[in-house]
Amino acid sequence: MPRQFFVGGNFKMNPISRAQKKIIIDELNAADLDPNTEVVIAPPSLYLLPLKDIVRNDIKVSAQNCYCKTSGAYTGEISPAQLADAGIPYVIIGHSERRTLFHETSELVAQKTKAALDGSLSVILCVGETLQEREAGKTTQVVESQLREVVTVLNESDWDRVVIAYEPVWAIGTGRVATAAQAQEVHAYIRQYLSTAVSSAVSGNTRIIYGGSVTAANCKELSTQIDVDGFLVGGASLKPEFVNIINVKRN
Ligand SMILES: O=C(CO)COP(=O)(O)O
């Protein structure tokens, strides 16, 4: 079966007001969206339930993070069980902002990924190298080591609910997008790695999406790459052009 194209909008800690959010949701609700593309939006946790209630049914809602325990004394955290109970189907795990600003290790990212999958969520698992690592020729080594931790703790069937987001840190929020060839090279590497480390079925079925300064203007070329199965969009997911990105396969 062909991999379904996937477009996620990571709102990060934006926008500030509920009124601004409503405008974004109203635009999405009114838009003519490609029914063949899976669309997921990830607002700050405070807004998960209100947005879920007002957004159209064919757009799924995702958390931006969760913890690896079911409940307990973990002030400030949300558990996979709580997200599942609230009817939130997806969670982003291992975003570079979590890894860098909040010191999440690949080991913790792997534990969270496993806990989320065990809690019946689907996971958007983020990996990617810094500029320094790319310039040192370590891109694939870094991405592989981030994935290896996860591979170690997942069962083969867990991968049915994992989308891998390749997000080079140097392209996030910088306006500096990876070229289609740079993205394809790393996506192909990830697919090859999944084939050797997990199975050829998981390699063939897992969606690998690109994130990092994706816009309506640059998404077309990226989308034509054979191993690019969609996008995780930050800044542009807050703008009307998000609709054009969702519809890139149709235009
Ligand atoms: O981090 C990202 C998505 O998770 C990408 O952010 P930008 O699209 O703003 O670069």
Image (tube, grey):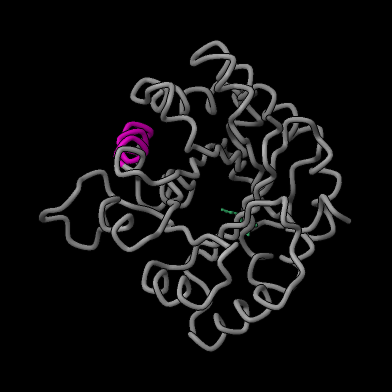
The front one of 171 and 192 is 192
Q: Give the image location of residue 62, x and y in percent.
A: 46, 58
For image coordinates 43% across by 68% down, the residue present is: 44
Chief secondary structure of the magenta portion: helix
For image coordinates 60% across by 62% down, the residue present is: 58
Residue 53 position by quadrant: bottom left
Q: Which residues are magenta?
A: 106-115
Question: Can you name the residue that lies furthest to the top here?
Answer: 196
| Ligand 1 location (quadrant) | bottom right
Q: Where's the C terminus, which quadrant?
A: bottom right
For image coordinates 72% across by 50% down, the residue present is: 36
Q: Where's the N terminus, which quadrant?
A: top right
Question: Can you name the residue that lies furthest to the right here?
Answer: 251
Question: Can you name the residue that lies furthest to the left here?
Answer: 73
| Left/right of residue 248 with respect to residue 18 in the rendered view | right
The front one of 135 and 43 is 43
Q: Give the image location of residue 123, x and y in percent.
A: 45, 43
Total number of numbered discs in the rendering: 0
The front one of 163 and 136 is 163
**Residue 5 shown in magenta:** no
Q: Give the image location of residue 154, x and y in percent.
A: 37, 25
Q: Give the image location of residue 76, x and y in percent.
A: 23, 63
For image coordinates 43% across by 57% down, the residue present is: 64
Residue 178 position by quadrant: top right
Q: Is residue 229 above or below residue 233?
A: above
**Residue 107 shown in magenta:** yes
Residue 4 position by quadrant: top right
